Amino acid sequence: MIHHDLIVVGGGASGLIAAIMAKDLGKDVAIIEATDRIGKKILTTGNGRCNISNNNICSPFVNFHSENNNFFTKTLNKFTVEDTKNLFLSLGLPIVELENGKMFPKSLQASSVVDILRMCLDDKNIPLYTNCKVTDIKKSKKFIINTNNEEFKEFSSKKLILSCGGKSAPKTGSDGSGFKLSKILGHNIVEPLPGIVQLKLDYPYLKALSGIKFDGEVSVLVDGNIIRTEKGEVLFTDYGISGPPILQLSSYASKALYKNKDVRISIDMFPNETKEEIENFIYSHFSIFNYREISSCLIGVINKKMISTLLKDVGIKDIHSCCSELDWKYLSILISRLKIWEFKCTGTNGFSNAQVTLGGVNTKEIDDNTLESKIVKDLYFCGEVIDVHGDCGGFNLQWAWSSGCLAGNSAAEK
């Protein structure tokens, strides 16, 4: 049996920082990682650039979410964005700020972040056990940790940090095992759901729209009520819809769908113009060019590949007839569609394509001052395994750094 005073289960962003912080306080700490190397999920963030944080993070932390929305405040206040910048700079990694407050390593390579953290483990002589998937944990006077690795079959520790991640992007090692281990230790789990993920739509012409991109304003409606609105580039796919605004809204859709509520996605293709302005333009445009085909009159107004589908949706059967032959009631419907194009949302694109997990260990069972379990003494949590998630744009990695720092410091200091 291998013994360390503190064992961190999970070599992702939060677990690595937790181990580094504990070591800096003189703790005998080791990391157990299920896969063959650390930081796999870090490599996928920010389109391979690693969106390490966001400079717009500040109290009251409106970009963070949990069933218990006061839980994350103390953690984020104790280890701030400025602390994150200073920490990585001290490790040899300069940070730059780009669009919308998003922060990246100066190299714009996610691999730089993983390399720096790996070198830090080496510099501090923190033992790392890879290819060790934890299968069971028991607690009496100390923790007994069993793995599937024949060489490193059993560990013991006085204290334990669970930083196993959630269920999103399972190819990186986030397979939900942290939730199973938490349950073994007596904790309850808020239902894990996919977040920051593409959405599936029920629409008969999706294949015709697939691949079309345009800028617009998107709203998610739950049981007829607008919950949140985002602007940005929208992308239709053969299964539904994607793009930055969709990813931001997807968490609301995911939760509502789980509760069997009616979820709709509404798109405004002209968010900077009023319906009256669009109405005046369309009526004038179709009057001036009434000798042209109906489909031709929308060229230059919207994406050409979208025209035939939109006209079918409006109910115009012969899109090649002259505008002069068009019943103008259809123009009224068309104008409405340009401002409110509504789709029924039927699901998400699943955990395999999700960037984050909604849900996790119930925060009512965790001390927000230390991230120690209220149920099991000397057990701590950090990162995505906890029921906390952030918006897209560096918020989730900041939660990883902040919670990892607090868990590591707390476990080392007590």
Image (tube, rainbow, N blue to C red):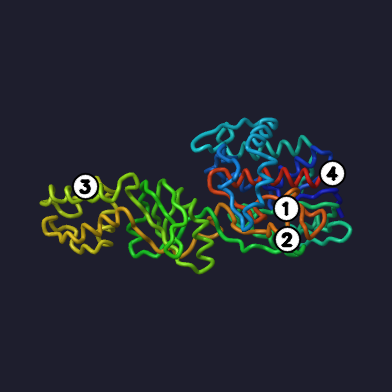
In space, the residues marked 3 and 2 are separated at their CA atoms by 59 Å
Categorize mark 1 by other alpha carbons within 10 Å: few (<14), some (14-19), many (20+): many
Residue 68 or residue 180, whichever sits in front: 68
User: What is the CA distance from the residue labelled 3 to the residue labelled 1?
Assistant: 57 Å
Q: Amino acid at mark 4?
A: Asp
The answer to whether marks 3 and 2 mark residues whose Cβ atoms lie closer than 8 Å is no
Amino acid type, label 3: Phe
Which residue occupies 32% across, 48% down? 270
Q: Residue beneath label 2, please?
A: 182
Tell me the tag on residue 281.
3
Q: Position of residue 208 (x, y in %)?
A: 32, 58
Q: Amino acid at mark 1?
A: Phe
**C-beta proximity under 8 Å, tags 3 and 1:** no
Is the residue 301 above or below the residue 106 in the image?
below
Do the CB atoms of the residues marked 3 and 4 lie less than 8 Å apart?
A: no
Residue identifier under label 4: 28
Q: Residue at x 41, y 46 (%)?
A: 232
The Cα–Cα distance between marks 2 and 4, rounded to whole angstroms, is: 23 Å
Q: Measured from the top left, where is residue 78 in percent x and y?
A: 70, 41
Q: Secondary structure at mark 2?
A: helix
Q: Nearer the viewer, mark 3 or mark 4?
A: 3
Q: Identify the element where label 3 is drawn.
A: helix
N-term-proximal mark, 3 vs 1? 3
Number of the front mark, 1 or 4: 1
Using the numbered discs, state the Cα–Cα distance from disc 1 to disc 2 in whole angstroms.
9 Å
Residue 381: which disc?
A: 1
Residue occupying image coordinates x 52% and y 43%: 47
Query: Where's residue 143, x and y in %?
Result: 84, 57
At label 2, which amino acid type do we have? Ser
